[in-house]
Amino acid sequence: MRTNGHSRSAAPADPARPALPAEEPAMCFDRATLAYGDRVVWSELSMTVPQGEFLAVLGPNGSGKTSLLRALLGLAPLASGSLDVLGGPPRRGNPDIGYVPQHAGFDRDVPFRGRDLVALGIDGHRWGFGRLSRADRARVESALEDVAAGPYADAPIGRLSGGEQQRLRIAQALVGNPKLLLCDEPLASLDMRYQQEITELIGGWSRDKGGTVVFVTHDVNPVLGYADRVVFVVNGRWAAGSTDDVLTSETMSGLYDAPVEVLRVRGRIVVVGEGSGAGFDIDEPHHFPEPTGVHHL
Amino acid sequence: MIADLAHLLGYEFAQNALMAGVLVAVVAGLVSRFVVARNMSFAVHALAEVGFTGSAGFILIGLSPVLGLLFGSLLTAVFIGALGLRIRERDAVVGVVMAFGLGLGVLFITLYPRYASEAFNILFGAITAVSHGDLILMVAMAAVTIVGLGIMYRPLTFATVDPVVAEARGVPVRLISILFLLLLATAVAEAVQVVGVLLILTLLITPGATAERLTAHPGLATVASVGVALVSTLGGILLALVTAVPVSFYVTTIAFVCYLSARFGLPAIERSRGVTGS
């Protein structure tokens, strides 16, 4: 077990992918604004995340959480401001970035096995028709082992449960030995047990390998024990800092521009809104605060 | 009957037909895997039917119907690619383009009164009429399709199975979509030679759909898909040589039997597929 949280040695040194100096942040947003046409998603976002940290990205649906990941992936250019990822501007296909999407089931009959899915993480982006080298096949095996997916690695992926598919997707994202792991609602539509398992896999990777995690979630509770830092985005506004700084009644009321109460109940965080429903989230008015008045962040 | 067959196989037309059959089957078997996985049956149909219009147009101006077919289906691929890349709008775009293309076909047939038998060949297939020149063109088309598929095999697989992650990993998903449509158009123009426009799905859907039922191993599924296409095509040609029934009937029947066997006749394989499930 490794305890040095800010360097990595899991893979043989790759001259094409030099290690990032430890003092260099994993990502740095500087007055970054993202807009689609006239619609500003978030504006003037400034935030620096050191290597090895676990950042939880929170906020109601449609508030630009996924857009934040797309900006980091180089898929959504900023309207203004700057963003550095792993020591350079975002670029498409950066091999140092792994990506775990929201669970969306695979086609039931697609002839594709878990190990094939993981192998895509090594060479799926390369042109041509290639076979994995022996060393790469060993990496696939060890990635499968790391997420305990060995027993179903040869089953058709479409027949696996949501939790099993997410484990395979984590193995796929990690097999390329990334420095930064981006997760877009990886817990959505999973039951409680799988939510814990998946979070532990991702949090454990960050802890053991010193990798940086950006974890988009609408419910902060599953990641409370892992998140070093949170950023909450809503209606183009944002707040970043530690969980205790951001998830307070004062900060949240400021973000929503309306009275919002943040309660801590038995180690869980519950956000309670006014219940009027008016003037909140334009994109999904029922999502936050809910008319019943109680919302699990 | 065997003696008849041996005798017929001495003729150039029969040899041409078998060689064309092998080319078509290999191309169709490979492409079919992706057609099924990407849900592109309707696009295949449109590419073939507008290919028919291209064929009719080329005959009208005195050019090769095979080239016309290729031209028509490639042009359709460009239209579908440019107008409808998102899954949601693709079906509608395919329908719109296909309807207009077929309308033109009606015009071309009307303008060329002696067209009837050639039209029949293109609609239902006439592999025993493949000439030496056609064969050379088919070799070229097969080479383009197979090489093209080889070049984009991995990113195409990634974009097909897991498009969201593929995009995140830098795969040019849009470009891959358009390139695959163009390859598909070429494969369609090739397969029409055997089974005709109306029966195209038997070679571009059935092999891939059958293979899915047999194995979860992607490589084996590709082999199985090519195998089904080969058995159907060559079996169809040989049976048609010794009987009076057209090739396409045999090809569609053999392919259908393969599919049914895979679907219902192999419960052991089906069992091995159901692992945990949710």
Image (cartoon, rainbow, N blue to C red):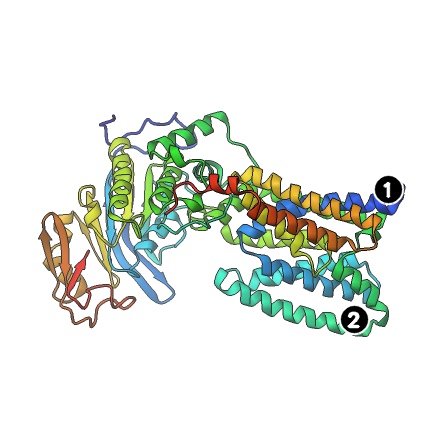
Disc 1 is placed on an element classified as loop
Q: As shown in the figure, which amino acid type bears the numbered disc 1?
A: Leu
Q: Position of residue A280 (x, y in %)?
A: 21, 68
Q: Nearer the viewer, residue A84 or B250?
A: B250
Q: As shown in the figure, which amino acid type bears the numbered disc 2?
A: Ile
Horizontal side of residue A227 vs A97, given as left or right: left
Q: Are marks 1 and 2 in contact (CB under 8 Å)?
A: no
Disc 2 is placed on an element classified as helix
Q: Position of residue B122 (x, y in %)?
A: 76, 60
Mark 2 lies on residue: B109
Q: Is residue B35 visible?
A: yes
Judging from the image, mark 1 belongs to the subunit labelled B
> What residue is drawn where x is 53% and y is 53%?
B38
Q: Position of residue B170 (x, y in %)?
A: 45, 46
Residue B113 image-quadrant placement: bottom right
Tally of numbered tags: 2
In the rendering, which numbered label is found on residue B215? none
- Of tags 1 and 2, the one toward the viewer is 1
Q: Position of residue B249 (x, y in %)?
A: 74, 55
Mark 1 lies on residue: B9
Q: Reading the chain from its start, which is encountered first: label 1 or label 2?
A: 1
Mark 1, residues whose alpha carbon is within 10 Å: few (<14), some, or many (≥20)? some
The answer to whether tags 1 and 2 share a subunit is yes
Q: Nearer the viewer, residue A204 or A166?
A: A166
